[in-house]
Amino acid sequence: MKTTAVRLYGTNDLRLETFELPAIKDDEILVKIISDSICMSSYKATIQGPNHKRVPKDIATNPIIIGHEFCGEIVEVGAKWAGQFKAGEKFGIQPAIQYHGTQHTPGYAFPYTGGDSQYAIIIPEVMEQDCLLHYSGKAFFYGSLAEPLSCIIGTFHAQYHTKPGCYVHDMGIVEGGNMAILAGAGPMGLGAIDYAIHCDRRPGLLVVTDIDQARLDRAASIYTAEEAAKNGVKLVYLNTAGEDPVGRLMELTGGKGYDDVLVFAPVAAVIEQGDKILAFDGCLNFFAGPTNPNLSAMFNFYNVHYAAHHLVGTSGGNTADMMEALDMISAGSLTPSGMITHIGGLDAAAEATQNLPKIPGGKKLIYTHIKMPLTAIDDFAEKGKTDPLFAKLAELCAANNGLWSPEAEAYLLANGQKIDE
């Protein structure tokens, strides 16, 4: 079977190519990929090429398919897995497979297993770790967003607290406590807000900060204070670009501080701000993955000693986190549409990945069987003046608070130009 895919050959060398996939073996599964959400991690792998710790050294002669936030349908099942999966069902995938201690994962290391492709082969390394997951949600893009959501869910689960005189870690956020998500109006921050107000262990106060008022306003229009209040959470959006952001953050807690602080930007000043607002036994989670291997920040070790402050970091979620994300999406508890700001076809994936930090907005969603330039949802109406496809997509998104939707996805898949045409 032929597939068209984006393959990485070297440092910043991505190529859209059509090539032959081998026939699957008894311990493999052939899948049709429908959607892939572009992750900043793919950008890092692209600009580092074989120097990236997850990318093989020989990609110049054995290129790999990029993309790891993908969802689609199963086409053919090898005999070994016939009792667990069947052709025609939807799937999600946990790419952090942790196979025998290696860091080789789908989207980084394999020639036939990656998300920016029409078809892919799910290899034994994935299957043996139970990382191919059943998915029953109504939209493929929700399944693609389950992977970044699993990273967020893992962050919440990695938080820990202790009781005086006890060394047992109580895992998770403080239920009913004070939580701050710093630099939280970006796409991953929006996912964290959604999870914080809809999961089964919620804060009492949730403060989301950013220095971009437009981003804060968009976040507030998607995840409203009223919706949070229905779930027992007081949600406050705060612009920290002005004077004394620490003082204003502390004032919202009556001077107590925050039990849980999540840092969503790899910026020393933001990390240090988070340190200064921790309550007694407060836990700071450094979520944002830096590109600078020497990123450092000041941390108050007097408070580590006397105020029981502690620091954790998470990089990705595990399979249980992924399953929780898929279950909550399928049940309608999480609606991560707000994370997405741009839609494109497979022909746009390489350029979008290479230029990801320069493209404003949130997540960029690729439909792998569609030919379409990467386009901001906010620009659909303007493009719709001359293109009826965009006119209809603009109408469907407008009916969903300006967000991408299952209805918009279904229309694009049915009416968009196919990559093969």
Image (tube, rainbow, N blue to C red):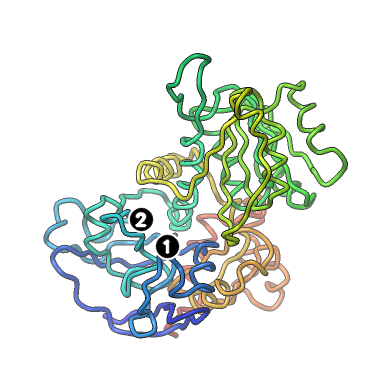
Could you tell whether 89 is left or right of 359 in the image? left
Q: Is residue 358 left or right of residue 241?
A: left
Q: Mark 2 points at which residue?
A: 93
- Height in image: 356 above or below 332? below
Q: How far apart are marks 1 and 2 (CA)?
A: 8 Å
Q: Which residue is drawn at 31% across and 51% down?
A: 133
Task: Please state the horizontal and vertical placement of residue 72, each as a whole percent of the image.
Answer: 37, 61
Residue identifier under label 1: 68
Residue occupying image coordinates x 39% and y 59% = 71
Image height of 365 relative to 403, above or below:
below
Residue 210 in the image: state x and y as whole percent: 74, 47
Residue 332 can be seen in this image: yes
Amino acid beneath label 2 = Ile
Q: Nearer the viewer, residue 145 or 287?
A: 287
Which residue is pictured at 13% across the width and 65% down the height?
A: 26
Against 408, residue 222 (above or below) is: above
The amino acid beneath tag 1 is: His
| Quarter-of-image position of residue 383 | bottom right
Q: Is mark 2 on a helix, strand or loop?
A: strand
Mark 1 vs 2: CB contact within 8 A: yes
In the image, what residue occupies the spot 62% across and 74% down? 388
Which comes sooner in the sequence, label 1 or label 2? Answer: 1
Residue 28: mark in rendering:
none
Q: Nearer the viewer, residue 206 or 400?
A: 206
